[in-house]
Image (tube, rainbow, N blue to C red):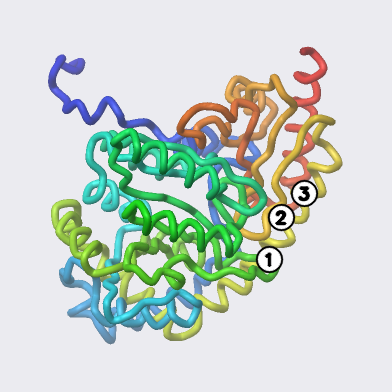
Amino acid sequence: MSAVPGTFSRRTYYMRASEIRELLKLTEGRDIISFAGGLPDPRTFPKEDLAKIAKEVIEKYGDNALQYSPTPGVTPFRETLAEFLNSHGVSVTKDDQIIVTTGSQEALYLVSLTLIDDGDVVFVEAPTYLAAINAFRVYRPRLVSIPIDEEGMRTDILEEKAKKLAADGFKLKMIYTVPTCQNPSGVTMSRDRRKHLLEIAEKYNMIVIEDDPYSFFSFEPLNVEHLKTMDKNSRVVYLGTLSKILSPGLRIGYAAGPKWIVSYFELAKQMVDLHSSTLTQYIAMEAIKRGLVDSTVEKAKKIYKEKRDAMLDAMEKYFPEGSHWTRPAGGLFVFAYAPPGIDTKSLLPEALLRGVAYVPGASFFVEGGGENTMRLNFSYPTIEQIYEGIKRLGSLIAEKAGKR
């Protein structure tokens, strides 16, 4: 039976398939070197330790770990999480609330559901995280992009656009940023710009969403503070996840922020899934307490730094003249610019035929542009695959650039 006109809500018109998830389906089971998804290297998974913890959790906490739990999350886990965040420079105070989510993607959805009305202005980076765009777009905000450079979001341009939009009568609602080891670019926002961003948010009474999946993977010292820690006016919500630093299969994310905001996330989550997995919360709690998360991070940092260096070296060797790319201080991605005139979305089918995949960059720009860009993941492929995949990709780009 085909869809009957009028069956679905108008909201479904604004839903978009994630290019990343679609690419993962295309590459699954095929002999393709994939730079597409932000998958952790399986070598970082502490399988034996997690198996031991899971067994002990069921033996020790069985009745509680296998039962329903409160919507915000298992209380001892949230307390452990608060201690963990504070120990890593993310200020969580008595005036804050933590809610556990089913991955950080659910946290982005709860942000959208509770904070965005039709026409609200939401500022995002250009480029920005694709899955955040998709979560926001369904609630029909006015998405306004702010370019980035090597110091992160251009807060001078943010201020100019905020001033103009406010004068034109628009409701300025939110600034969404991945300020540390950004996805997709890998750049980190400078301290001065973080301070300026918070000043702008205060002036125009905006909420700041600090999405931080990657700061644990900094390969060089970063002289910055988290926006959540710098916030003195209770307007920053910090989103985090254990997906990259322990295991994505546990599906543990979280939001930490002022109670007056996060309490509404709790109401929304009751409608979405009641609560996140009780069992995996207990497993994650024990993993944090036993130092397993910290040791996994240290192991992963060494692996990912070596892979980042390999990708940058391979691009220097094989990408044609006219290309350039970011040199991330951390995270899992390099954002690359092919020579002008190359459309990376049109190029992708040919790349797949040559056995290499990437994410075309245009989808990371909410107001257009980025047609010659691509996001390249280095955490999942092996070093040998990185060199071979970049060689294939560079050769293809060079061919297309030579034919223009």
Q: Which residue is depicted at the point 24% across and 29% down? A: 12
Q: Which type of secondary structure does the marked residue at label 3 adopt?
A: helix
Residue 346 location (% of width, % of height): 60, 20
Measured along the vertical axis of the image, is residue 56 above or below residue 90? below
| Residue located 28% across and 41% down the image | 171
Q: Nearer the viewer, residue 158 or 152?
A: 158
Q: Amino acid at mark 2?
A: Arg
SS at circle 2: helix
**In the foreground, 128 or 380:** 128
Q: Is residue 366 above or below residue 105?
A: above
Whether residues under marks 1 and 2 lie with C-beta atoms below 8 angstroms apart, the answer is yes
Pointer 1 residue = 219
The answer to whether residue 401 shows anywhere in this view is yes
Residue 252 at x, y percent in the picture = 36, 64
On the image, the x and y values in percent for residue 370 come to 59, 30
Query: Is the residue marked by circle 3 packed among few (<14), some (14-19), or many (20+) residues within 10 Å?
Result: some
- Numbered label attached to residue 308: 2
Q: Quadrant of residue 307?
A: bottom right
* Disc 3: which residue: 312
Q: Contact (CB < 8 A) between labels 3 and 2?
A: yes
User: What amino acid type should be assigned to the residue bearing mark 1?
Assistant: Phe
Q: Earlier in the sequence, mark 1 or mark 2?
A: 1
- Position of 176 with respect to 267 (left or right) is right
